[in-house]
Image (tube, helix red, strand yellow):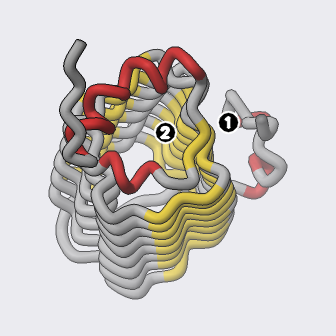
Amino acid sequence: MPVVPEQLADLPYAALLRPHTGPLRRDARYDTVHFDGGEYTGQAGGAGFLECAFTGVELSGAALRTSRWNEVWLQGGRLVGTELVDSEWQDAVLLGSVLAGVSWYGAQLRRTVLRGCKLESVNLRGAVLRDVVFEDCLLRDVDFGGAKLTEVTVPGCTLEGVRFGGARMEKVDLRGAVRLGLPDGHQGLSGAILNTGQLFELAPQFAHALGITVKD
């Protein structure tokens, strides 16, 4: 488990942060900027964030297609109806945040941690996730259809209505999940690691997906 800064002061670039004012702008470059509170909407596609901190912000309906998030720390955020299509995330941390109705498909997430977050109706179809940790999160109606997941873990997470149809997995460790609620897409679990209890829990759904009838 990677070491995650819990407080703003713990960030290695905390002393360099400058407060942000005004709206987000399309194709803008933000370097060591602190976004503290406030609601951001509108078009900001192609924006780049390097060593930035977000505390208590709301990205409501913001369009951030192809944006880049490098060494970003986001705490207590609300991303509602946010468009993050084809965005790139690396060495990012999201703490205690809510993501609802987020379009995150086609994105690339690398060395990213989501801790204590709630993801609801999030579209991650076709995304590429490598070295990503979902810790103590609720994932409800999250769609990983066609995504590529490598070395992804979910310790302490609850999965409800999560779909992996057509996904490609490698070293995806699901053993730490509190619950695996997977309505379909079980063939996409090839490459995942399960514990014995999870295997027994999912056995009827595996059998159904393979067209097997079990009778005693």
Cα distance between the residues tagged 2 and 1: 8 Å
Q: How crowded is mark 2: few (under 14 residues within 10 Å), some or many (20 or more)?
A: some
Q: Give the mark count.
A: 2
Q: Give the vertical position of 34 relative to 199 (above or below).
A: below
Q: Give the vertical position of 149 relative to 122 (above or below).
A: below
Q: Which residue is drawn at 67% across and 36% down?
A: 8
Amino acid type, residue under disc 2 in the picture: Thr
| Residue that protrudes farthest toward the front in the picture | 216
Mark 2 in CB contact with mark 1 (< 8 angstroms): yes
The part of the image, by quadrant, that contains residue 102 is: bottom left
Taking the image as shown, residue 111 lies to the left or right of residue 80, namely: right
Q: Residue at x 47, y 64 (%)?
A: 168
Residue 13 horizontal/vertical position (percent): 79, 54
SS at mark 1? Answer: helix
Q: Residues within 10 Å of mark 1 (few under 14, many from 20)?
A: some
Which numbered dot is residue 179? none
Provide the residue designation for mark 2: 55
Provide the residue designation for mark 1: 8
Residue 48 horizontal/vertical position (percent): 51, 77
Question: The C terminus appears in which quarter of the rendering?
Answer: top left
Q: Residue at x 62, y 61 (%)?
A: 130
SS at mark 2? Answer: strand
* Residue toward you, 12 or 191: 191
Amino acid type, residue under disc 1 in the picture: Leu
Taking the image as shown, residue 5 lies to the left or right of residue 166, namely: right
* Residue toward you, 14 or 212: 212
> Would residue 143 be seen by someone viewing this image from the given angle?
yes
Q: Which residue is drawn at 36% across and 27% down?
A: 202
Q: Give the vertical position of 41 relative to 205 (above or below).
A: below
